[in-house]
Amino acid sequence: MGIDQLIETIQSYDGPRLTFMEVCGTHTMAAARFGIRALLPKTIRLVSGPGCPVCVTPVGYVDHALAFAEKKGVVIATFGDLMRVPGSSPQDGDGVPRSLTTARAKGADVRVVYSALDAIEIARKSPQLEVVFLGVGFETTAPALAATILKAAEQDIKNFSMLSAAKTIPEAMDVLSSAEDLNLNGFLCPGHVSAILGSEMYRPLAEKYGLACAIAGFEPGEILCGLNSLISQTMAGKPMVDNCYASVVRDQGNPIAREMMYRVFKPCDSVWRGIGSIRGSGLCIRAELAGFDAAKKFDVSLPRPREPKGCRCGEVLRGVIDPPKCALFGKACTPDAPQGACMVSSEGSCAASYNYQLGEGQ
Ligand code: SF4
């Protein structure tokens, strides 16, 4: 079906109100950029869920990274999108939320890298320093994080470690599936994550909760194709897993990437911002590789984690409210002066709503 026909078919829907959730930061941005929500009839609601890895990383993790950053001789290596995520308030004296950016301004050695392997390079060239890489991401990133640790082990680099906050998506989708305040009808499943996991991974959601699932790519036609499938499945009363991204996603995903991931990490409970602790949704570094686990290697005392005052990221990440509903949105919280992670990350729902000037329900 061409895009025009897809739009026409979707807009002709006049059944009961349906709510679908996408759980992928790239879908969040693509839906905003292409104005997908504006194309939907009033009876179809597309909400964004916890699909941005930086956004779901809890404030306690940022506090942990900040505590390492304050240690003499420690280099924090991180992807750029974590730099401005606020730690626990209260803020520094000047009212700016504490973050890796403010820590660096005060003299901490915090370096932005483009690959986890760059962090190994820093460690190799500076044996007098301890390099801690901040390992944040979902299944798409976790195999590369695992490969980095395996490489450090192979090269016997002892001054490199990782603070892992890597997470797996299906467990969060399972929790949200039964959330009464969401009343979901289906998931627009993430394209990149599905390439690793495989389409079969979502079958339990369709069977256990009766939710429609459609895996979609990131072009407007691909997203609309996924939404059209979700509507059709729901109306037919036959929830299933429809792989609308078969050019990239296979039934069994990428077993080689998963094997590497689980050679280094083991499932553990993990805290998600806005959702809380989800059983088995985290990826902790295995005991035999504990020398590369920054959480075990360094002892630091941490403050009681506190979310930025007034920030409603938690509700945004659960799809309970749209970003403009937050009183700080576009006023005290903008991409230039973010208060919460959802406005910091380029894949965050608040940043998407702000940058593409989306109102409530858009
Ligand atoms: S607009 Fe800012 S303060 Fe409000 S929920 Fe989003 S990130 Fe948090």
Image (cartoon, rainbow, N blue to C red):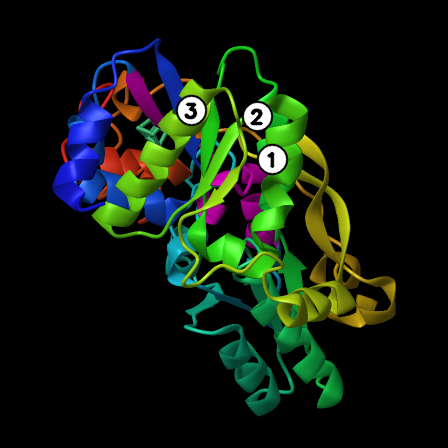
Question: Residue 323's image quarter?
Answer: top left
Q: From the viewer's perspective, is 265 left or right of 44?
A: right
Q: Residue at x 50, y 19 (%)?
A: 237
Question: Residue 6's image quarter?
Answer: top left
Q: Are marks 3 and 2 in contact (CB under 8 Å)?
A: yes
At label 2, which amino acid type do we have?
Leu
CA gap, disc 2 and disc 1: 6 Å
Q: Nearer the viewer, residue 3 or 135?
A: 3
CA gap, disc 3 and disc 2: 9 Å
For disc 1, does the CB lie below 8 Å from ligand 1?
A: no
- Secondary element at tag 1: helix
Q: Which residue is mark 1?
A: 172
> Outermost residue, right direction?
288
The quadrant of the rendering that contains the C terminus is top left
Question: Residue 35's image quarter?
Answer: top left
Label 2 environment density (alpha carbons within 10 Å; few <14, some 14–19, many ≥20)? many
- Which numbered dot is residue 62? none
Q: Which residues are magenta?
A: 44-67
At label 1, which amino acid type do we have?
Ala
- Which numbered dot is residue 319? 3
